[in-house]
Amino acid sequence: MSSPNPALPPSLPAGDPSHPANARRQLLRVLGWAVAAVAAGCAAFIAYAAIYPERMPLAIGTIVEDITGANPQPVALHVPPSQPLSAVALLGKQIFNDPSLSASGKQSCASCHSPEHAYGPPNDLSVQLGGPHMTDAGYRPPPSLAYLYRQAPFSIGPDQNDMDAAPVTLDQLATAASGTQRAVKTAGVAPAAPALVPQGGLFWDGRASTLQDQAIGPMLNPVEMANKSTGEVFHKLLNAKYLDQFKQLFGDRIVSQPDLLVDEAMFAVGRYQFEDPSFHRFTSKYDYWLQGKARLTQAEMRGLRLFNDPDKANCAGCHLSKPTADHLPPLFTDTQYEALGVPRNHDLAINKDRNFYDMGVCGPFRDDAATLTQYCGMFLTPTLRNVATRHAFFHNGVYHDLKHVMDFYNLRNTSPEKIYPLDAAGKPEKYDDLPAKYQANIDVADAPFDRKLGEKPAMTDDDIQDIIAFMNTLTDGYKP
């Protein structure tokens, strides 16, 4: 008798679990359970869709976002067209870049609003140096001049509908709004309180309503371009290398009309800012993501959700992140004013005077709203586009990186000792950059400021890093 083949398995009883037939049956049983589970899940999903059809795009979209980082509902953004600049705008570009128009002969508009830095400051100083000898410290950090092409004039309350009625003063508008409770801002929702807070305008306090009005401000500021009068600006323009362009555009007589020449020069600067695409590029990673042309990383996706979450960061409550109904790209500002209570920047020369307070809308750099004390401490909400390229934040430049900015929002109310200086008794001097009689204007209703002392902050450190990752997607120049 031949010996058994060692390559063959020994004979197994039919009931043994290791028997090949039983193993196949077990595999088929497991596969059957899996198919049944998938079928049940699909049935539940279909049933849910039948009951809540309006929720399906959001649910499916969230799944797609989580897996791929893609926008499941891309939009076609309506951005300003790119076309050749008008002759007036080309003249404005030369004026914008001309340092000879300053008292020092060394400072132009572009010195503080650098094209290479999203038309913001080119360094990390809290304020810029200027004046006749370029040694005087400014009062506030220059805001970016980018993305102002849709900025409305300064106002309080809704637009006046009756064009035949007498103009309403700021005092009248403020009085009308004073009896109404301020609405809480919610992320992702259009501003809910246009009748209650100021909106629009340029500079941190909104004192200029047009780009033309804004352009003359630095020309006459004693710590910036430092001309003593529009007459000095006029004489500098008469000696400019582009004077013949003024004559070609506005006629030879303009050189004998000082006020008109200066007005047209500032108008030209405004046209340059309005027409040149570099002031509103819309080439960030987020813009491409909105259009379905880029994918966000997992950290950026988490940051976007936290940015929009009304119970967490709630950034989008003021920095609107969604396209408008007519597909205009978001500007990441509601153009309204907020009193945030940021700590005093003791490094500013102007703050060496302990009795000086920069109170935004109600002064001291604008004087037409000095009596509107319900707005003291309020400053314009800036765009967050290109925010990662900035190095001085808030109206006094007290912070120099986004981590400190986010810590301020997160800890201002829950752990104020980490934000404000301590007095002799070790108690934090909360809201130390605004007189006590105006501190009721400071926002304590909107998240994350709705937390109380000692409570858990709205965000973890990981949350903050994700939000910063998202804010980095708002920088122009991304290559999809």
Image: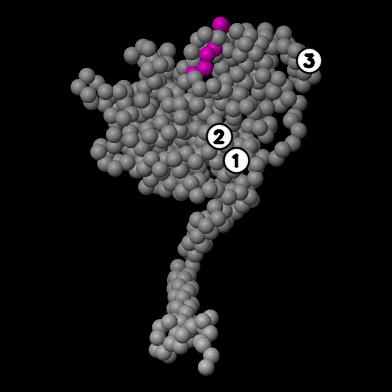
Q: Which mark is residue 386?
A: 2
Disc 2 + disc 1, Cβ < 8 Å: yes
Residue 117 on image: x %, y %: 59, 27
Q: CA distance from mark 3 to mark 2?
A: 37 Å
| Residue ID at (58%, 50%) | 295
Magenta residues: mostly which secondary structure? loop
Q: CA distance from mark 2 to mark 1?
A: 8 Å
Examine the rendering and report whether any part of residue 303 can be seen: yes
Residue 160 on image: x %, y %: 51, 37
Q: CA distance from mark 1 to mark 3?
A: 39 Å
Q: Which residues are magenta?
A: 127-133
Residue 68 on image: x %, y %: 55, 55
| Residue ID at (55%, 48%) | 296
The amino acid pointed to by label 1 is Ser
Label 2 crowd (10 A; few <14 / some 14-19 / many >=20): many
Residue indicated by mark 3: 244
Disc 3 + disc 2, Cβ < 8 Å: no
Residue indicated by mark 1: 284
